[in-house]
Amino acid sequence: MIEVKTKPLSVNKAWQGKRYKTIEYKNYEAGILWMLPKVKIPAPPFKVSYEFGFSSKGSDIDNPVKCFQDVLVKKYKDQGFKDQDIYELHVVKKIVKKRQEYIKFKIESL
């Protein structure tokens, strides 16, 4: 494993000024919140696994993580799910046909 001795930069530190949610993101958030099932969240710290089914090979594996994870936190925060308690993350990219895109996730205790 290669080590780079520097402090990781957060998304919050990478941008200046206020960022606003787009209409597309607001619609995405509302749709995902409606589709997410009721689940029992285990005790932190968490290991979270994501599988994103993309229809484009050009899609970056990490781009959907933050948006989807923020929606998960919004949905399950009352059960103690906070992204600051995620200590391990596993992300998989799959290529699927158009209109067959999906997101899978699993939240486990570490």
Image (spheres, grey):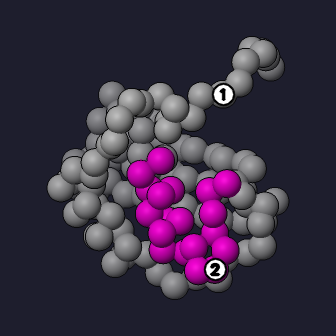
- Check the picture and name the quadrant holding the N terminus: top right
The secondary structure making up most of the magenta span is: helix
Residue at 22%, 63% in the rendered image = 27
Left of 36 or right of it: where is 45?
right
Q: Position of residue 49 (x, y in %)?
A: 62, 54
Q: Report the magenta residues as a range.
A: 66-84
Cβ atoms at labels 1 and 2 below 8 Å apart: no
Residue at x 34% of width, y 42% of height: 18
Q: Nearer the viewer, residue 105 or 46?
A: 46
Q: How many marks?
A: 2
Please report whichever mark, 1 or 2, sits nearer to the chain's N-terminal start.
Answer: 1
Q: Amino acid at mark 1?
A: Pro
Q: Is residue 94 visible?
A: no
Q: Nearer the viewer, residue 70 or 92?
A: 70
* 17 relative position to 4: left or right: left
* Residue 78 within the magenta-colored segment of the rendering: yes
**Residue 105 rendering spot, x and y as whole percentages:** 54, 61
| Separation of marks 1 and 2 at Cα, in angstroms | 28 Å
Q: Which residue is mark 2?
A: 79
Check the image and report above or below for 95 versus 22: above
Q: Is 74 a magenta residue?
A: yes
Q: Is residue 10 left or right of residue 57?
A: right
Q: Is residue 102 visible?
A: yes
Tell me where residue 93 appears, x and y as whole percent. 48, 41
- Identify the residue under disc 1: 8
